[in-house]
Image: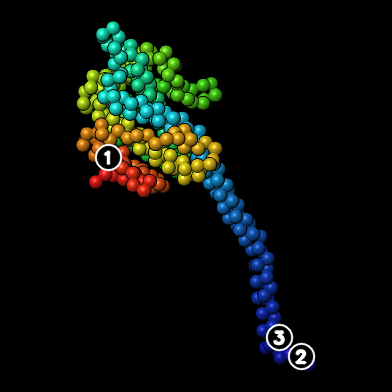
Amino acid sequence: MSLPESITVELQSSSGIWSTAKDIITALTPLVSVGIAAVLSDRLLRDRKSRDLAEDVRLVVSQRVEPFFRSGDALVAKLSTLAQADFVSVLPQQHGAARPLTENIVLLNLEYLVAAFWAQIELLLSDAQSVRLREDARGQAMLALASAIEHRHVSLLPREYQRAIGSALIDRDESGATRVVNFFEYCKIRSDPEVSRVIDVLRDEVLMPALKRNRRAVQSLVLMCTVVHYGLDCLLAADDAVLGNTGDGDIVSLRPFQRDTIYNKLSQRSRRDAESIERFFEGIKDAPQIRLYTRPTTMINGELVRKI
């Protein structure tokens, strides 16, 4: 029994359509496979690149965080001591007369501590040009402090001088590795005309007036001390959040005690200026309040709070 002609034609037509569709699918399959493979490969490459960048950030931060913290903490310790003594101890007496300021080892040390911290900031900013340091909480905290130090209400000198002084203390070896010179090396290069030209500005416009108890110069140093102290405590909080106070390179152990604030040495204007920089540290987990560093505080249930 044969099928009607119309049905036979229809089946042949359908068979042709399915054959054509099969050919199209067969032809497209390699293209689709290649497309999927390309998408997956691109995604894997992006993920790997992202992981590599994150690893680069962690590596750079781990290399910078300890010397940055040590330098800043040494500066805070010195300025706090001098502020509590009203800078009198910077002018040691010898046979009833003060030694020349230019020959005063305490003055040289103070110069060095300020300049060395600025040098650490220069190294940090140089790294930030090639690595996204803000992706690490500690990198974010260090960059926030660098920005706060350069704020017009806090900076000791115009940014150009700060950058020049910091750069003068950076040493680069044959391999290209950089470091900040130590105090002994600083004493040897201090007489270099190129170094003296920028360091003398710091000495003549800020440090020497402060040693002579010029109120404006003293407040500039006390304000800087307060801001650096606060910024380092924010860095400690960020470090604890990243490493859980257990990882290698943890900087919490570098300062196992809470430094006393010098809020009682701040003028009302300096307090306002210090409190204005808190915005730079927004987003840092468990960051303390700046007012704990600028106002009288007391302990209640183990927590620092402002006195009423």
Identified at 37% across, 12% down, the residue is: 191
Q: Which residue is mark 3?
A: 8
Q: Report crowding for label 3: few under 14, some 14 to 19, many 20 or more residues within 10 A (C-alpha).
A: few
Marks 3 and 2, the one that precedes in the sequence: 2
Q: Is residue 24 left or right of residue 156?
A: right
- Tell me where residue 23 sits by quadrant: bottom right
Asked which quadrant contains residue 93, the reply is top left
Seen from the viewer's position, the closer of residues 63 and 265 is 265
Q: Name the amino acid, label 1.
A: Pro
Kindly tell me whether residue 53 is visible in this rendering: no
Q: Quadrant of the N terminus?
A: bottom right
- Please tell me whether residue 229 is drawn above or below residue 191 in the rendered image: below
Tell me where residue 114 appears, x and y as whole percent.
Answer: 36, 25
Tag 3 and tag 2, C-beta contact below 8 Å: no
Residue at which label 1 appears: 296
Cα gap from disc 3 to disc 2, whole angstroms: 9 Å
Which residue corresponds to mark 2?
Answer: 2
> What secondary structure is found at the residue carrying circle 3?
helix
Q: Going 47% across and 25% down the picture, which residue do you hit?
A: 179
Q: In the image shown, does 266 or 258 lie closer to the viewer?
A: 258
CA gap, disc 1 and disc 3: 100 Å
Percent position (x, y) of residue 248? 54, 37
**Labels 1 and 3 touching (C-beta < 8 A):** no
